[in-house]
Every structure is written in C-alpha cells, then in structure tokens.
Amino acid sequence: MLELKNISKTYGQTMALKTIELFIPEGKTTILLGQSGSGKSTLIRIINGLIQPDKGGTVFFEGIPVTPQNALELRHKMGYVIQEGGLFPHLTAYQNVALMAGYLGWPAERIDKRVTELAQLTQLPLDMLSRFPTQLSGGQRQRVSLMRALILDPDLLLLDEPLGALDPMIRSELQNDLKQIFQTLGKTVVLVTHDIGEAGFLGDQIVLLRDGQIVQQGSLPELVHTPADSFVTQFINAQRSPLEALSL
C-alpha cells in the first residue's frame, strides 16, 4: 500500500525527518508514535502529498510515486482526519461530510445514501447532521471528521492525533469505536499518537520516532520486551498507568 524511501525534511536549519525508510502493509493499522516534535505529523503530511520531502525522497502509494502533479488526484484515495477534526464552522455536519462528494459531482441521492451509511458506521445520530460544529460535542465532531474522511471510500485512512483533545472517558469510547470501524472496513490505516496505550490498542504495528528518525518498528510486546535501545524503555515507562499509584 505505502512505501517510503529516503524520506527527509528540512525547515531552514532544522531537520524534521532524517532518512526514513518505511513499508506500510495493506489492510493493517500502523501507528506513528513519539513525543511532540518527533516528526510524526510531518511524515503523515508527506504521505498524502501536502508537503514535499527533500530531494531524493519518494513516497509510493499503491506503487505510484506521489508528486506535486498527481498528489491532488491520489488524495481522493486517501481519507485524512487532522488534529481536532478541522471541520468548517460555517457548514453543518452534513455539509462537512458531503463536501468532497459534492465537489466531484455526486448526485444528491448517492450522497444521502453514503452519509447515512457512515452515520450508522460511526454511531452518529442522524439528527446531529443538521447541526453546526459548535453545536456538537468533541466526540461528535470527531465522528463527523471521520465520516468526511471516509466519504469517498478511500483505500488509505490517515489520522493525525484524532483523539488528543478529548477527555479520557470520551477518548476511551472512541478508541473502542475506531478499533471496531478499522476491523469492519479492513482498510489500511496510519494513525499518529503520542499515547503508548492507544498505540498498543489500535495498532498492528508501531513505528516509534525520536528526533525525526525511526527508533524501532514492531508490535507493542516487541517494544516492551526487546527494546532497540534505552529510549524505547524510557518512553514506555514514562507513560505510567494510574493503577501504579495504588502500590505507592
């Protein structure tokens, strides 16, 4: 589905990504994990062509190099959920979801059918679709954002910290829903998070980044039991379970 070759990105004197080589398998959920500033969001924007890697780096999507010339066309096959949803405040939930389908000239009946299917998939009550984003809860806005990303039935779903702004109970509920949705659709998913628990719960494979480089790639048990270096262990141990307080 995705292959990243020799991907680096420099902003002025700052090197955000340093020679990333990564294969992302079809039909699996890959987690980009790391601290703030580790390059996760930069990498996901390079994948969908919103920004270009430095010279010599190439993203292959379904075997096709992503270039400035074809990025817009290829993005029709990529659903993208940005941080905090990114809904247009002057549009209703329905209008936000239907935006790209309308732009591509889908007939109203087809759009209605697809929006209804996605509302059922994401468990968003249909009466919420007539509301504006400010009239929705944080969890509801994220469901609308996911619906918008899925409207064109993309081959690849990209999510950049989709649950980071939610309170713990809503976040847990949406994690469960996302896992079920990923399993139901069977799509290739790339999700950015800094939360090791979320990564382990949702991901088939985890890619841990530090300072723009891949430190280790594998399952959560592999990161825990066979860490590549001391940073992996430090990163995992830094995210303590609240249950540990009971032993103090």
Image (cartoon, helix red, strand yellow):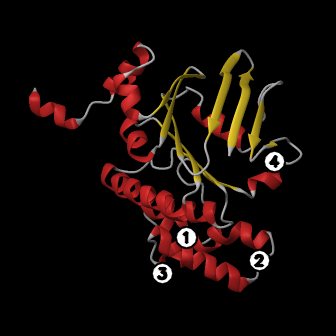
The residue at the point 77 percent across, 30 percent down is 53
Q: Which mark is residue 127?
A: 3
Image height of 11 relative to 108, above or below: above
Checking the image for residue 71, the label placed there is 4
Residue closest to the eye, 131 or 202: 202
In primary-sequence order, the first of circles 4 and 3 is: 4
Question: Looking at the rendered structure, which numbered label has been put on residue 151?
Answer: none
Cα–Cα span, label 1 and label 4: 30 Å
Q: CA distance from mark 4 to mark 2?
A: 21 Å
- Residue at image coords 45%, 17%: 228
Look at 55% across and 60% down and name the residue there: 146
Cα–Cα span, label 3 and label 2: 22 Å
For label 1, the residue is: 132
Mark sitting earlier along the chain (1/2):
2
- Amino acid type for the residue under numbered disc 2: Trp
User: Marks 1 and 2: which is nearer the front?
Assistant: 2
Q: Residue at x 32, y 30 (%)?
A: 239
Observer-side mark, 3 or 2, equals: 2
The first of marks 3 and 2 along the sequence is 2
Q: Give the structural element (helix, strand or loop) at label 3.
A: helix
As shown in the figure, which amino acid type bears the numbered disc 4? Ala
Instruction: Say if 70 sits above or below 37 in the image.
Output: below
Q: List the residue tagged with mark 2.
A: 106
Please provide percent x and percent y for residue 93. 57, 70
Q: Quadrant of the C terminus?
A: top left
Residue 117 position within the rendered picture, expressed as x and y whole percent measured from the top left = 55, 76
- SS of the residue at dot 4? helix
How far apart, in angstroms, are the residues tagged by discs 4 and 3? 35 Å
Categorize mark 4 by other alpha carbons within 10 Å: few (<14), some (14-19), many (20+): some
Earlier in the chain: of badge 1 and badge 4, it is 4
Mark sitting earlier along the chain (3/1) = 3
